[in-house]
Amino acid sequence: MIKAIKGFNDILPEQAAKWLRLEAVLANVLARYGYEHIRLPIVEQTDLFARAIGGATDIVEKEMYSFADKSEPPTPLTLRPEGTAGAVRAVIEHNLLRGDAPKLWYIGPMFRYERPQKGRYRQFHQLGVESFGSTLPDADAELIAMTYLMWQELGLKDEMRLQLNSLGEIDERHAYRDALVTYLTDKQEQLDEDSKRRLTTNPLRILDSKEASTQALLKDAPKLAEFLGDDSIAHFEQVKAYLDELGIHYEINPHLVRGLDYYNKTVFEWVTDKLGSQATVCAGGRYDGLIGQLKSMGSDKPAKSEPGVGFAMGLERLLLLIEAVAPFDEIVACDVFVAAHPDVYSAGVRFAQNLRYDRADLRIKMASATSLKAQMKKADKSGAALTVIIAQQELDEQTISIKNMQTGEQQTVDQKWLSNKENFAI
Ligand code: ATP
Ligand code: MG
């Protein structure tokens, strides 16, 4: 038998019901902040990601699913490993930045070639948010406040810790990078292999190395905060002031650098202690240079940028956390089961159809026209609170029999009894 590809998961009905519930909670919070939904392609040109995310990042170096299509010459394409690059491409392509810049959200699968383990898959799902048009710190704080409300709505507020850092502007970061490289070059023999390689490709990533020996070396290294300019410092202070105002606690993590090159100024992560080493549930930051960088692709002239700030949350990790600490109430697919004797089955179909019309709040299920006994067995398994039974006698008397599935109690009532919400609510 052919099986699913490693790291690509089926989401089976019991689990998928939880996905729908989670997505509804998140979409509701986004709507309350006035964010608009956008749907974007899953495949983009490889160059878009190489350019936006950065050539020396883990994603572009080793995690992308890239292929050539059948056009002549073939176009290099990639399954999206994240959503920001595509969202930025779309807003530039469709001129959405003119006038009132949009605040957008999207949801869907992302693809990275990683070693599958709990909370880490090759196809996984993100909810992403991008807020365009403001250089001001209130935009950063709004995104954080919105995620905080999501945690509150999901009962996860006490499980999440907010980590913050400022990466400053590009020139500040470059000055810091040079100082860090100078400091570490003498000591490179003591670095782990990955960090040694990063010393020439992406030195800032050394800061988030998980190796204890590397972290020990970094204790006396120059600090990024010492290289920030006045504007970066003021911006960061204001973000923190907004969070203080809102009562949202945060920890400053000077080693938080994020794995993507497009960030400047504020970066943040929501982390939990409940998911082992897959601890980051949601991560984001500001990217004021990305739009200009993508606009100028294929030309030597720099283009005017527009500010942006965004985040992405990993929905598999979020669901693992929900299951561990605040599981959803049991989700059943059926409230009312309609069972009809095979001789009068069409009357049962008509009854169920009318009831679905009268009671849009109920989930009403039938089984096929087998024996009443077989249908009652299915009713037992359906999770329904109530089963309606229709046989010749009910039809003649224009009644229905109803069975309370909890108590087993059965009675005969008027045909229209269920159409009245006061008689039966869930
Ligand atoms: P990590 O350090 O765990 O690899 P990342 O920095 O690569 O994460 P981002 O690119 O910031 O992750 O993606 C945002 C979020 O998407 C992560 O915080 C995580 O919740 C989720 N995520 C990223 N990669 C995966 C994956 N392979 N499987 C499941 N979820 C993922
Ligand atoms: Mg990663």
Image: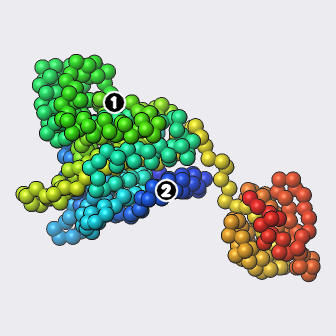
Closest to the observer: 413 or 351?
A: 413
The disc label shown at residue 57, or none: none
Query: Label 1 vs label 2: CA separation?
Result: 30 Å
Q: Quadrant of residue 415?
A: bottom right
Color theme of the render = rainbow
Asked whether residue 372 is in view, the answer is no
Count the numbered circles shown: 2
Image side of residue 149 versus residue 140, left or right: right
Q: Classify mark 1: residues with Cα within 10 Å, few (<14), some (14-19) or many (20+).
A: some
Residue holding disc 2: 32
Image side of residue 305 versus residue 162, left or right: left
Image side of residue 15 versus residue 267, left or right: right
Whether residue 401 is situated above or below residue 192 in the rendered picture: below
Whether residue 167 is situated above or below residue 10 in the rendered picture: above
Image side of residue 173 versus residue 105, left or right: left
Residue holding disc 1: 253
Q: Nearer the viewer, mark 1 or mark 2?
A: 2
Whether residue 106 is situated above or below residue 350 in the rendered picture: above
Q: Is mark 2 within 8 Å of ligand 1?
A: no
Q: Residue furthest left?
A: 300
Closest to the observer: 96 or 67?
A: 96
> What is the x, y in percent for residue 211?
31, 24
Q: Classify mark 2: residues with Cα within 10 Å, few (<14), some (14-19) or many (20+).
A: few
Task: First in sequence, mark 1 or 2: give its number.
Answer: 2
Element carrying mark 2: helix
Q: For the residue marked with disc 2, what is the amino acid?
A: Arg
Whether residue 96 is situated above or below residue 54 in the rendered picture: below
